[in-house]
Image: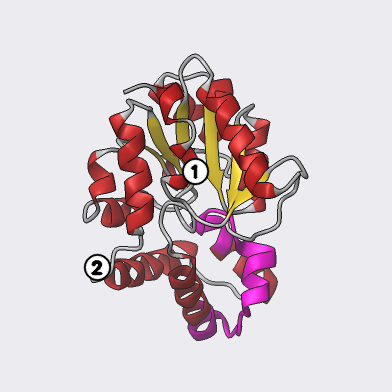
Amino acid sequence: MPEPMLAREVMSDWARGPRPAVIFDFNGTLSDDEPILFRIFSELFDEHLGWSMTQHDYDSQLLGHSDREIVEKALAITGVDHDVDALLELRKGRYRDLVADHNPIQPETVRLVQVLAERGVPMAIVTGAQRDDVRAVLESSPVGELIRVVVAEEDVTRGKPDPEGFLSGAAQIGCAPSDIVVFEDSVPGIRGALAAGMRCIAVGAGPSPESTVAVIPRLSADVVEHVLPLLGA
């Protein structure tokens, strides 16, 4: 079945549920910032670990993991002994500087969130990013007023693909996992959402671990346009 049609069917089934809700991944999904993160991590690892990380290295070994796990994996790959927290602080400062002048949540994604909010759809963010990163982006975006629940790296003991973060997000918005559709851009995130018993749609051209997972090119209001009558006013 063509992916756009599969996505339409997933969303139609979701919208017919008793209380449809949405969980967004943050980096690379709600926030179009994976190029920013690759730049930051590649510079940090080159400067402090002597590792010239390639895009393939990042995509195949690090993408989708929490910030702490990314640094820990880089240390394991290079065999360098370095303080994890010190690297995370440097990464946090550089990220804040880079998003200060250009918010990475795209206008079409903002519109999607606004449409969902207008229909009273509960929403949450479940991410391996640090809470300060998420706050830095949300505070300067209209999305920040509409998504109140954030499950960040500091809030879980086991990161994606473990379903812990997704189940915590579901509990905080008061919705059953079966009523939730998750938008994700990484294999660990997709696997975590499915393990939590949620529907999942992959965003972007990244690999899907399951043939039944639909893929959409980007987050926009188009993904829910055909189910708005089911969501109510």
The amino acid type, in three-letter code, at marker 1 is Val
Q: Nearer the viewer, residue 158 or 64?
A: 64
User: Quadrant where the C terminus lies?
Assistant: top left
- Looking at the image, residue 190 lies above or below residue 133: above
Q: Residue 2: x and y, percent?
A: 72, 48
Magenta highlight on residue 65: yes
Q: Secondary structure at mark 2?
A: helix
Given residues 104 and 114, the one toward you in this image is 114
Residue 63 visible: yes
Instruction: Kindly identify the residue that appears in the image at 42 percent across and 30 percent down.
Output: 228
Report if residue 163 is visible in the image. Answer: no
At horizontal 61% and vertical 79% (from top left) the residue drawn is 53
Q: Where does the N terminus fall, quadrant-wise?
A: top right
Residue 162's label in the rendered image is none
Q: Residues within 10 Å of mark 1 (few under 14, many from 20)?
A: some
**Residue in the foreground of this view, choosing between 154 and 162:** 162
Look at the image and say whether residue 208 sits in the magenta stretch: no
Disc 2/disc 1 C-alpha distance (Å) = 29 Å
Give percent across and percent down for residue 188.
65, 49
Q: Nearer the viewer, mark 2 or mark 1?
A: 1
Magenta span: predominant SS is helix
First of labels 2, 1 by sequence position: 2
Which segment is the magenta one?
45-70
Helix, strand or loop under label 1:
helix
Mark 2 = which residue? Answer: 100
Q: Is residue 202 left or right of residue 87?
A: right
Residue picked out by circle 1: 223
In this rendering, is residue 142 above or below 99?
Answer: above
Q: What residue appears at the point 58 percent right and 55 percent down from the top-left corner?
A: 64
Crowd band around label 2 with a 10 angstrom C-alpha radius: few (<14), some (14–19), many (20+): few
